[in-house]
Structures are given as structure tokens and as C-alpha cells.
Image (cartoon, rainbow, N blue to C red):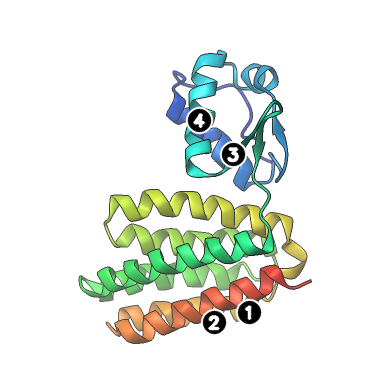
């Protein structure tokens, strides 16, 4: 298993540290509700506490870490209500991204998205791989919109999505259905059909919420 809590291989900066911690949270290495110990993290990352605190402050501002008075910093715990709220924000960003993509070279964008869908189909039988390719599809969709702000906000939401998938893997299955959902979205974008892509993305988010919140 890849560890994100390890010595940095380049000059340490708060942004690099924040990215390391963000990836560790998304991968489940730093689990929901876990307390972050400064001394231990500084040792594992090979950095001093000053830039570590700055990096952790960035994640606090993003909402991935929460301070508890007289106790310290903790990784957020994604409740059912927070999962729904996170997907509401993702839906707003990704439907906007799809609208922007369709307003541009939608055929080329659709081809790129369909290439990701093919990789997802080839990975069926490997839930972890399918999950990562699923996320890659949505990251690409927002990237294709060429909006730095949408991409920046989406990065935090994708970390929260990874947290949910790792914590609730048993309820987030159905690889074949997920492949079909993504293929239909990509095909609608390639056809330049914004309304169809919009409807499919909304339904896709509702389906994801249902999978992740079922008990």
C-alpha cells in the first residue's frame, strides 16, 4: 500500500505538506475522526512544525480537518448528512463543468472521457481500480472545463469522496452499472447534448448518494 506520510523528496513547503496530508486522508491512511499529532507527522514527513502547521491550516480552511478546543486537529468524519451535502456541491460543480465543456470542443472532450470509461470497463473485477478510474473521470470532466476555481474546489470534494468510498466500500459496489453511467455521460457530452449530460450527471450523483448512505 502506498504511504503518503513519508519524508518529502523535495524542498518542503506548506502546499506540498497539505497535498501529502490531503492524499493520505483520501486514501484512508489518515482515517475519519483520527487525531493529527504534530510531533509524529513532523517526524514522518521529515519537516519542522512550522510549515506542518501551515499545511494543516490549509486543510482546516478546506474543511478536511476540524479543530476541537483543548484537544487538537482531527480528520472530519463524513456523516450521512455530510455525504449528501458534499455530493450536492459536487453536482453543482460538475454540471457547470459539463455545460462549459459542451460549449467548447465537445467531441474531443467526449473522446477523452470515453477513453477513461474504457479503462474502467477493463478494470471490472478490481473494485479499488474501478473506484480510482471513476474518480479520474470526474476529475477530467472538471479539468476540461478549464476553470481553475472549479478545479480547486473540486479537489477538496474529491478527497471527501475518496474518504467515503474507502470507509463505505461494502455499500459502494456495482461496477457494471457505474461503467454504463459514465459511458452515457461521456456520450452525451461527445454529442454536444448539454441537457442530456446535465440530467445524467444529476441522476449519477443521486445514485452515488444512495450507494454510499445505504446501510
Cα distance in 3D space between marks 2 and 4: 40 Å
**Front position among marks 4 and 1:** 4
Foreground tag (3 vs 1): 3
The residue pinned by badge 4 equals 57
Q: Is residue 88 above or below residue 4?
A: below
Task: Specify whether residue 76 is in view.
Answer: yes
Can you tell which quarter of the image residue 67 is in? Answer: top right
142 over 155 or under it: above or below? below
> Distance of mark 3 from mark 4, alpha carbons?
8 Å
Which of disc 2 and disc 3 is earlier in sequence? 3
Badge 4 or badge 1: first in the primary sequence: 4
Q: Earlier in the sequence, mark 3 or mark 1?
A: 3
What separation in Å lies between label 4 and label 1 (alpha carbons)? 40 Å
Q: Within 10 angstroms of label 1, few (less than 14), some, or many (20 or more) residues?
A: few
Residue beneath label 3, please?
65
Identity of the residue furthest to the top in this view: 48
What residue is at 59 percent from the left and 39 percent from the top? 65
What SS does tag 4 mark? helix
Nearer to us in this view, 209 or 145: 209
Q: Specify the farthest residue to the front.
A: 69
Question: Can you tell which of label 3 and label 2 is closer to the viewer?
Answer: 3
Residue 177 x, y percent position in the rendering: 61, 81
Q: Which residue is the site of mark 2?
A: 180
Place residue 23 in its image quadrant: top right
Residue at image coords 51%, 15%: 50
Label number found at residue 176? 1
Alpha carbons under labels 3 and 1: distance apart: 34 Å
Q: Secondary structure at mark 1?
A: helix
| Residue 30 left/right relative to 156 | right
Q: How many other residues sit within 10 Å of disc 3, few (<14), some (14-19) or many (≥20)? A: many
| Contact (Cβ within 8 Å) of mark 2 with mark 1 | yes
Amino acid at each position: 500500500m502506498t504511504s503518503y506520510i513519508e519524508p518529502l523528496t523535495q524542498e518542503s513547503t506548506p502546499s506540498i505538506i497539505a497535498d501529502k496530508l490531503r492524499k493520505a486522508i483520501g486514501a484512508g491512511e489518515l482515517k475519519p475522526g483520527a487525531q493529527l499529532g504534530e510531533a509524529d507527522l513532523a517526524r514522518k514527513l521529515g519537516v519542522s512544525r512550522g510549515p506542518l502547521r501551515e499545511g494543516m491550516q490549509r486543510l482546516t480552511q478546506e474543511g478536511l480537518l476540524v479543530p476541537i478546543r483543548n484537544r487538537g486537529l482531527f480528520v472530519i468524519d463524513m456523516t450521512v448528512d455530510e455525504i449528501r451535502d458534499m455530493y450536492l456541491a459536487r453536482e453543482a460543480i460538475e454540471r457547470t463543468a459539463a455545460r462549459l465543456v459542451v460549449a467548447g470542443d465537445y467531441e474531443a472532450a467526449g473522446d477523452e472521457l470515453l477513453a477513461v470509461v474504457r479503462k474502467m470497463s477493463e478494470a471490472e473485477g478490481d473494485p479499488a481500480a474501478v473506484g480510482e478510474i471513476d474518480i479520474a473521470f470526474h476529475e477530467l470532466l472538471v479539468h476540461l472545463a478549464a476553470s481553475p476555481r472549479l478545479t480547486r474546489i473540486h479537489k477538496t470534494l474529491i478527497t471527501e469522496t475518496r474518504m467515503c468510498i474507502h470507509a463505505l466500500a461494502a455499500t459502494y459496489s456495482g461496477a457494471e452499472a457505474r461503467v454504463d453511467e459514465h459511458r452515457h455521460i461521456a456520450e452525451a457530452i461527445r454529442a454536444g447534448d448539454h441537457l442530456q449530460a446535465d440530467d445524467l450527471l444529476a441522476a449519477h450523483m443521486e445514485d452515488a448518494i444512495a450507494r454510499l448512505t445505504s446501510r
